[in-house]
Amino acid sequence: MSDPLRIGIAGAGAIAFGTAALLYKNRHIPMLWSPSGAGTEIFTHEPLQARGVIEAEFRPNIANSAQELSDNSDALFIAVPAYGHKAVMDALAPHIRDGQHIIISSHASFGAVYLAQALAAFGTQAPVTAWGTTIVSGRKQDGALVRVNTVRNRVDLCTVPDTQATNGLDLCQTLFGKRFQPRDGLLAISLSNLNPQNHLGIALCNITRMERGEDWSQGQNVTPKVGRLLEQLDVERLAIAKAMNLDVKTIFEHFHQSFHVPAAPVSEMNQQMHTRGYGGLGPKTADSRYVTEDVPYGLQVTATLGRLVEQPADLHEAGIKIFSAMYGRDFAQENELLQALDLNRFELHDLQKAARTGLLQKTSNPVP
């Protein structure tokens, strides 16, 4: 077995806690940094407790700043909602060392390109690995308790620059085991995260439960009609991937690999998850990442790529508009990463090159 690695986790939510517990179980040394400072205060008098498919209890190391996290870590792990990615990347970038690996869990909105360009501005050369989804799913409970619903069997990933792909895969396997499927660049990863499209259907069809703060089973309420909507959203995503000659998993593979149920219609798979006790609970508030994160940072990216390859994602576009109407917000304008990268200035071949190098530049000739 390799020596334990010190992994600095930027984040203090369910994914950060669940990932820290998995690292601890795998005999690595997690350190948590809460960008707001509030998320880790609980550990002054309570240990982190994981329950569910991971059972662990320990006191994680705590960093009080981005610099302390970076200085005391062999590799870094970004585990905050997508709307927090830019601020965290801006805080970490000045302190990242040459060769210090960064993992984004999960990747959104060409964040790896934004981070790679920020590092280049500091003269730093460090690989960035993007995951198509998180390694765990779960929910924070009271205090320092996190309930972990699943540890995924398969997570899509890529690394920029792609010359560091082998190192990225080796690191992830060292930390979490052989659970990773390399994909062909960031465009494939951007189209491999199914959470935004799935959460669109789940939240849209259960919004009154969320607003009322009800306790409700997510898996049980992916009824046949909700499941059919999710499947049709997947058809749009797969058509965009095909137009780009990208290999991405289907929604059926996603539920099978993530939740260990036999492949079947999406509703049937969710009913099996519910019956087996890991269908999960749906959001108890309308102020949920299913909307506030996934609409601007997930659906908007798919819609943008669809327009680039003339494969309009009509259901995704409609979802953005419907949620914007319901929330009284223009979610299409809330993506800080896309705005900072100003993708409208670039062509598809520019994005294809950036998906491998991490650097977004205007080029005159398409990538061969």
Image (cartoon, rainbow, N blue to C red):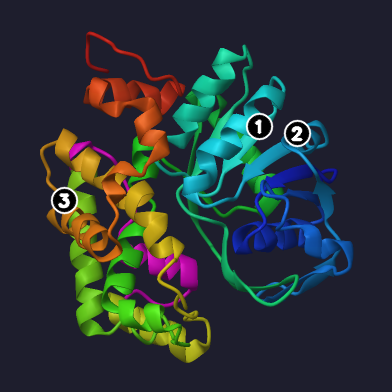
What kind of residue is marked 2? Ser
Q: Position of residue 368 (x, y in %)?
A: 25, 17
- Apparent side of residue 229 relative to residue 75 in the rendered image (left or right): left
The residues tagged by marks 2 and 1 sit, at their Cα atoms, a distance apart of: 7 Å
Vertical order, 312 against 49 (above or below):
above
Give the number of the disc on residue 70. Answer: 2
Residue 346 visible in image:
no
Q: Is residue 132 visible?
A: yes
Residue 92's label in the rendered image is 1
Instruction: Residue lying at the far top in this picture: please name it.
Output: 364
The amino acid marked with disc number 3 is Ala
Q: Residue at x 40, y 69 (%)?
A: 255
Seen from the viewer's position, the closer of residues 90 and 276 is: 90
Do labels 2 and 1 touch, CB within 8 Å? Answer: yes
Of discs 3 and 1, which sits in the foreground?
Answer: 1
Residue at point 58% right, 34% down? 89
Residue linked to disc 3: 313
Residue 320 percent coordinates (x, y)? 24, 55
Label 3 crowding class (10 Å Cα cut-off): few <14, some 14-19, many 20+?
A: many
Label 2 environment density (alpha carbons within 10 Å; few <14, some 14–19, many ≥20): many
**Disc 2 to disc 3, how far (Cα)?**
39 Å
Q: Say whether disc 3 or disc 1 marks the residue closer to the N-terminus.
A: 1
Determine whether, in the image, residue 306 is placed left or right of residue 211: left
Specify the segment rendered in magenta.
243-264
Secondary structure of the residue carrying tag 1 is helix
Label 1: few (<14), some (14–19) or many (≥20) C-alpha neighbours in 10 Å: many
Residue 66 occupies quadrant: top right
> Is tag 2's residue or tag 1's residue first in the polypeptide sequence?
2
Which residue, as the protein is rendered here, is positioned at the far right?
Answer: 45
Tell me the element at label 3: loop
Q: Quadrant of residue 224?
A: bottom left
Residue 190 % position (x, y): 37, 43
